[in-house]
Image: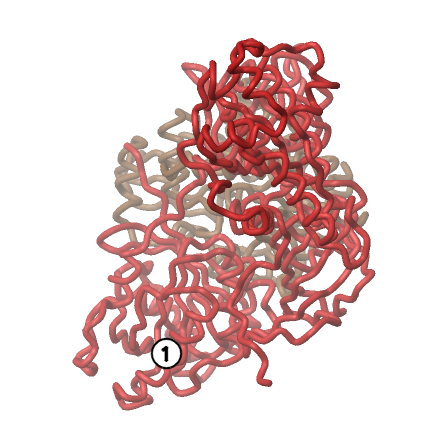
């Protein structure tokens, strides 16, 4: 397997099948963004046309209207078992966090709420190592204690694809099938497979969203890339990081690490 | 448009020898850094009262920045004029060896960073040793901090020679040993002005000379079954091909159990044309031509080339747990998609990676390497790591924690478990030659010799087989062929059970012997016992030639039927020229080479007398 996308797809399918075979009560975190839509596509490949576990949207009520429209259309079309509970209110969030991080931390609480409510043993998430330096340190199977915290000081050894998927009751495991993909890999795969994405990713009036979060904490970038080929060409040339438009990453040096240790994706 | 995979390379070496700095510089000098990143790093460095720290690029965690060490492996992408790379920055601190392994295991090439002043530290040696164990073959050495050695060639040579000697001892040939200054970028992307005496490649040139490890598509098929899905009314087996290839219509054999079936279809979703074949590295979904009870943990293989299948095996372990490993410890061994409880039966040799000396038996301390024997509850399929790495390795799990990595060396036959007995695996020594060439004599000599040494061995003699199992067969070409097929099948069953089987049949046809080889698989050793017809006829121990000449036996090989000698036998014995003793010894050596479970040969220095 020498083609990059074939290889990445093969790894991801292997990981998804391991997760499904070994982790009880699995769920998939669907942010409605490009990465988690690729993840759903890969599930359909791995499980021969179906997604055999629920897709969870952590709903803050602050998504763009286009995002909600996309969610409702494709939840039907892809026959997803959709869970879209509202995240707890902002008042429930640790007040010592910087302002934009507090908004993001609502999702952490929503995640914890979903784990508690549905008793998930494992959550499949579409994070990638190239997005953010602390995500670069992640494992494919990453355990989270009862409070959802990431113990980055003592991660389990993980090599030769012989993952550790079993953990004691009270621990859930995050599964990251896209860890080795890069942003441009995602777009090339979307183009190759004709995977639908929210239209906000494509340029309108000289702006497009490169990374899609909530209204108020996600900024569009200046771009004329109005189709897949232009997006790929733009990313090949850019030297600006993907999450530059995510306000919460830049609140303080350790803002994102604190979010992640607390259980954020 | 096809897009090549980025080459994964790992940066290893002792803590503080400059790995993370090297990575930062490599990215900067190949223009791979995001905008503003250098500015951000400058601000982060200043906040800690430090000069500019490249290492903060990858040391992203607060604890890493505050303490100035890498805790966990990180990944970062960069591009040279030739191709894309993904760099795995592995921690050098002893505390985090398991994280180093986690990073290094997915690399196809490695950069070993060595501080010119401190040279080969224990951690440097350990990292190099583990690379060898992980099977990372391509390596370049970067001798760093040359500025602190006044860019002096003599000092470089001392360190370079010591490193090269150690690497040679553990069986790694470095592609280059390069003097660098990571902080300043000397000999990384650009040639150093300070070290004109160095004429070898820069680091980027050396990396561009490496290649991807190749998927073992021509090796025997190994497909660990991950799961079985119901798809409509059919059962679909899914898994990833670890080695070899498959195609619709191929026969598959499954272990444990030994059931066989043919592949009826290769399933997929959203493909215009259904696929009919797949190779190593690809995930597949298969249906079979008839229902078998298969579940996760079964291993599918091509029937002609089975893996080892044993409950006792010798392995080399890397141990991570703070509690040392002792004989009798019960652990879970995970390999492929199967796992089961194993007991550490013995710890035969703990290896001091510093001096490469065996330090005797005993306990394996944290981060230690040792040769051990594992005894499982039931036999499990596996391959020797040296031959087929992807099915020759596993992890040891204690409760919910991964506490060690193992590579398998050989099967220790469960049937010969008596203490002190010779460890060997099953196999077939197939003697072919004219009647009277000496096959039975040599077979009986060999089996006596093996049994005396504690082996489990037996002879399947042609005459004996014809009296009993094959009493319904005559001597027509068809019956002779069937005779050989049955003997091969019996030999295979016995070999699978761990017995060394010596067959003594004329087996005159190349096609029949080739089929026997396919039936038995890789544990088949063909021996041509050669003697001229005149010699055999003169010996005529059973009076058969005389009867054939008299026309009383039809289709007698050598007289009225042809003998097709092997083209390239595994061993040739000229029984008219060699003594029986010498021939038996040659056969014994062959059996040892092919079936004895000797520890992997690695270059251990002998302890000083």
Q: Which of B247 and A264 is in front in this view?
A: B247
**Residue A53 in sight in this render:** no
Residue B104, given in percent of the width and then of the height, sits at 50, 59
Horizontal side of residue B560 vs B357, given as left or right = left
Residue A177, given in percent of the width and then of the height, sits at 54, 41
Q: For residue B346, which quarter of the picture?
A: bottom right
| Vertical relation: B479 (above or below) B10 | above
**Residue B379 in sight in this render:** yes
| Vertical relation: A238 (above or below) A62 | below
| Vertical relation: A233 (above or below) B39 | above
Count every numbered label the image shows and give the total: 1
Instruction: Read off the residue under disc 1.
Output: B52
Residue drawn at point x = 74 percent, y = 36 percent: A24
The quadrant of the rendering that contains the C terminus of chain B is: bottom right
Residue drawn at point x = 60 percent, y = 15 percent: B482
Shown in red, the chain is B
Please say which color scheme the image uses. Answer: by chain
Shown in brown, the chain is A
How busy is the neighbourhood of tag 1: few (under 14 within 10 Å), some, or many (20 plus)? Answer: some
Residue drawn at point x = 30 percent, y = 59 percent: B207
Q: Nearer the viewer, residue B71 or A210?
A: B71
Q: Tell me the subunit letter for badge 1.
A: B
Horizontal side of residue B338 vs B265, given as left or right = right
Could you tell me which secondary element the residue under label 1 belongs to?
loop
Horizontal side of residue A239 vs B475, given as left or right = left
The quadrant of the rendering that contains the N terminus of chain B is: top left
Residue B545, given in percent of the width and then of the height, sits at 54, 21
Residue B276, given in percent of the width and then of the height, sits at 46, 18
């Amino acid at each position: 397997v020498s083609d990059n996308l074939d290889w990445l797809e093969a790894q991801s399918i292997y990981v998804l099948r391991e997760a499904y075979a070994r982790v009880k009560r699995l769920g998939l975190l669907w942010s409605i963004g490009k990465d988690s839509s690729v993840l759903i596509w890969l599930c359909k490949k791995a499980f021969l046309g179906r997604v055999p576990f629920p897709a969870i949207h952590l709903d803050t009520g602050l998504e763009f209207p286009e995002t909600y429209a996309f969610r409702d259309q494709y939840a039907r079309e892809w026959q997803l078992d959709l869970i879209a509970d509202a995240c707890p209110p902002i008042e429930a969030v640790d007040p010592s966090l910087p302002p934009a991080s507090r908004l993001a931390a609502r999702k952490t609480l929503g995640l914890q709420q979903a784990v508690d409510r549905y008793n998930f043993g494992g959550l499949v998430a579409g994070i990638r190592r190239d997005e953010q330096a602390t995500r670069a340190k992640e494992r494919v199977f990453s355990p989270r204690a009862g409070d959802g915290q990431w113990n980055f000081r003592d991660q389990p050894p993980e090599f030769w694809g012989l993952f550790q998927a079993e953990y004691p009751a009270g621990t859930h495991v995050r599964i990251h099938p896209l860890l080795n993909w890069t942003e441009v890999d995602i777009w090339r795969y979307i183009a190759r497979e004709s995977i639908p994405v929210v239209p906000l990713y494509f340029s309108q009036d000289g702006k497009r969203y490169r990374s899609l979060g909530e209204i108020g904490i996600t900024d569009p970038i200046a771009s004329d890339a109005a189709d897949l080929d232009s997006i790929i060409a733009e990313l090949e040339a850019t030297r600006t990081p993907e999450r530059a438009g995510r306000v919460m990453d830049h609140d303080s040096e350790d803002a994102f690490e604190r979010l992640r240790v607390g259980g954020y994706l | 448009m096809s897009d090549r995979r980025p080459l994964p390379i790992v940066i290893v070496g002792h803590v503080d020898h400059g790995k993370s700095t090297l990575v930062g510089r490599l990215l900067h000098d190949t223009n791979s850094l995001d905008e503003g990143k250098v500015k951000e790093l400058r601000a982060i460095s200043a906040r800690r009262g430090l000069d500019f720290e490249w290492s903060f690029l990858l040391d992203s965690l607060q604890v890493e920045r505050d303490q100035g060490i890498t805790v966990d492996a990180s990944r970062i992408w960069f591009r040279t004029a030739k191709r894309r790379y993904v760099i795995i920055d592995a921690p050098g601190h002893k505390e985090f060896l398991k994280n180093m392994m986690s990073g290094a295991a997915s690399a196809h090439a490695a950069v070993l960073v060595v501080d010119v002043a401190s040279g080969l530290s224990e951690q440097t040696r350990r990292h190099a040793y583990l690379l060898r164990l992980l099977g990372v073959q391509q390596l370049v050495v970067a001798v760093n901090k040359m500025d602190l050695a006044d860019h002096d060639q003599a000092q470089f040579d001392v360190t370079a020679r010591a490193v090269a000697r150690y690497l040679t001892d553990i069986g790694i040939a470095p592609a280059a040993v390069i003097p660098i200054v990571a902080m300043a970028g000397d000999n990384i992307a650009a040639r150093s002005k300070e070290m004109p005496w160095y004429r070898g490649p820069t680091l980027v040139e050396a990396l561009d000379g490496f290649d991807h490890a190749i998927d073992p598509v021509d090796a025997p098929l190994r497909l660990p079954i991950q799961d079985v899905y119901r798809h409509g009314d059919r059962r679909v087996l899914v898994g990833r091909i670890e080695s070899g290839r498959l195609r619709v219509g191929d026969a598959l054999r499954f272990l444990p159990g030994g059931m066989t079936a043919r592949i009826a279809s290769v399933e997929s979703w959203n493909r215009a044309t259904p696929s009919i074949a797949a190779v190593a590295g690809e995930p597949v979904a298969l249906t079979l031509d008839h229902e078998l009870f298969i579940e996760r943990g079964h291993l599918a293989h091509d029937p002609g080339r089975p893996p080892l299948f044993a409950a006792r095996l010798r392995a080399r372990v890397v141990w991570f747990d703070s509690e040392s490993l002792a004989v009798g410890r019960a652990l879970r061994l995970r390999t492929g998609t199967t796992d089961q409880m194993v007991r550490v039966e013995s710890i035969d040799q703990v290896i001091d990676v510093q001096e490469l000396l065996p330090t005797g038996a005993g306990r394996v301390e944290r981060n230690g390497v040792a040769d051990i024997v594992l005894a499982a509850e039931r036999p499990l399929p596996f391959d020797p790591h040296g031959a087929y790495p992807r099915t020759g390795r596993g992890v040891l799990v204690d409760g919910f924690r991964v506490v060690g990595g193992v590579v398998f060396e050989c099967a220790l036959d469960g049937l010969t478990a008596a203490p002190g007995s010779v460890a060997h695996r099953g196999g077939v020594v197939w003697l072919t030659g004219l009647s009277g060439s000496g096959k039975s004599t040599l077979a009986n000599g060999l089996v006596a010799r093996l049994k005396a040494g504690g082996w489990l061995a037996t002879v399947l003699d042609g005459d004996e087989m014809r009296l009993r199992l094959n009493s319904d067969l005559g001597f027509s070409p068809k019956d002779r062929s069937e005779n050989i097929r049955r003997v091969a099948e019996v030999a295979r069953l016995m070999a699978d059970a761990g017995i060394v089987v010596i067959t003594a049949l004329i087996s005159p046809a190349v096609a029949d012997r080739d089929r026997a080889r396919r039936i038995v698989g890789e544990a088949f050793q063909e021996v041509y016992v050669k003697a001229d017809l005149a010699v055999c006829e003169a010996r005529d121990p059973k009076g058969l030639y005389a009867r054939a000449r008299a026309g009383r036996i039809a289709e007698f090989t050598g007289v009225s039927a042809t003998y097709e000698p092997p083209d390239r036998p595994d061993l040739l014995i000229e029984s008219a020229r060699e003594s029986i003793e010498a021939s038996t010894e040659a056969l014994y050596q062959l059996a040892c080479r092919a079936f004895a479970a000797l520890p992997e040969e690695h270059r251990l220095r002998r302890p000083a007398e």
